[in-house]
Image (cartoon, rainbow, N blue to C red):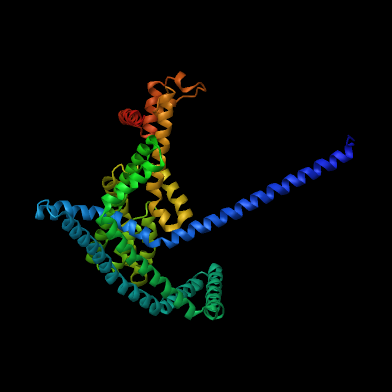
Amino acid sequence: MKKFNERQKRYFYLGLTLFISFSLVMIVSSYFTKAEIIVTTIGSIFRALTSVWIGLVIAYLTNPIMMFFEKKVFSKIFKGKKEGLVRGLSVTISILLILAVLAGILILVIPQVIDTLATLVKSFPGYWDNVMNFVEKFAKDHPGIGGKILEFTNDAGNKLMDWLQNDLLPNVNIVGTVTNGLLNAAEVIVNFFVGIIISIYLLGDKENFLLQAKKLIATIFPKKWYRRILIGCSEAHHVFGEFITGKIMDSLLVGVVTFLFMWLADIPYATLVSVLLAVCNLIPFFGQFIGMIPSFLLIFVISPIKAIIWLIVIIIYMQIDGNVISPKILGNSIGLGSFWILFSIIFFGGMFGVIGMLIGVPVFALFYRAVRYYMDRHLRKKGLPTQAYAYAGDSDDYPELVVPTHEQIDAVVSHFGVDDDDDETNGTETEKETNENS
């Protein structure tokens, strides 16, 4: 067999490298093309099942109300008899109560939204003239910098009017926009009412649906994983249930307190602002600021002095709510530090928008608990401590060889807020749970 010389070897390896690189590019591009098709298909399936997801959410949120009427009201009236009638009445009253609350909010808010828009349209020219008069007066009093500010304001106003007249309005398809808006609104309404019907079926026979779900899990997974999945579902129900219930109660309190304050202080748009703050408060961390900014601007258009007073009072109340009231209501359902709450909102909000901001915190709390459980379990298998303060110190030795001093333990406890007794208790509970799972 003829051997390659140096030049032929160089070309051979170059050709082989190009062939392998081209093959890898084709494989990767094919993978991503198929992945895109798969993602598109999954997205289409999820969109087709929009009514089902809405029904599941409504059923989950309505279940505590239904159970209250079933156990506290109708079971006592019928004395444990006629279970079908008791369940039917409980579901009907719960659904009607939720629909009545939503209808009442819409009836109160929609007229104020229309009135607000009309007021802004009518008042905008007058406020713009006031701004320009203020700028002109400032320019006369401060010739050095005032002239540049006046020139910038005039230029910005002219460009805004030019953009509205020549770019925005001619390119707006009013008929198409209105048609699309009506079609989207009709689709949302249809999905919502179909979701209501689905939720009635789910609530009416929820025990049977749960048994069928357990049967399916037992069919697919082995005994060990069956128990773990049920424990995980129970933990998810605990976290989501406490978080959602707590946030709804806290948001209702924010709305009521805001409305009473604005009504007593004769501040405009009391109903609209109260509902806006209550809804935005459902979003952890950022929700209060998201609701405060547009509310302040709405009140500022009518009365700047009242807007400033309102802002000061609301900021004070939000501090009290965030540091005292909300922790009392939510309790320890989340178990996350401030950094992880902020991280979960940013991550899930960036991935899934507003829905991600609403559910990101409890979802990440479940992930955090699962990771912590996994770490603690494997540390115990290695005979290592699960408490964080046991790893204090500057030594590079394996943790089992490190014995922290009392000073190091006190420093870690004071810095991270670790409670030694709670940590020991949590470790014991987790160890019991691990033994049960085993």
- For the point 34% across and 41% down, the residue is 230
Quadrant of the image occupied by residue 234:
top left
Q: How many discs mark residues in the rendered view?
A: 0
Q: Is residue 182 above or below residue 338?
A: below
Quadrant of the image occupied by residue 57:
bottom left
- For the point 30% across and 44% down, the residue is 238
Q: Position of residue 329 (x, y in %)?
A: 26, 47
Asked if residue 362 lies left or right of residue 9, the reply is left
Q: Is residue 236 visible?
A: no
Quadrant of the image occupied by residue 279:
bottom left
- For the point 37% across and 47% down, the residue is 362
Q: Nearer the viewer, residue 404 or 223?
A: 223
Q: Is residue 180 above or below residue 350?
A: below
Q: Is residue 210 visible?
A: yes
**Quarter of the figure that contains the N terminus:** top right
Q: Is residue 225 above or below residue 96?
A: above
* Residue found at the very far front of the displayed protein: 219
Q: Position of residue 229 (x, y in %)?
A: 37, 40
Q: Position of residue 374 (x, y in %)?
A: 42, 33
Q: Nearer the viewer, residue 99 or 27?
A: 27
**Quarter of the figure that contains the C terminus:** top left
Q: Nearer the viewer, residue 135 or 51?
A: 51
- For the point 42% across and 19% down, the residue is 403
Q: Is residue 86 above or below residue 406?
A: below
Q: Nearer the viewer, residue 89 or 153?
A: 89
Asked if residue 315 lies left or right of residue 141, the reply is left
Q: Position of residue 29 (x, y in %)?
A: 64, 52
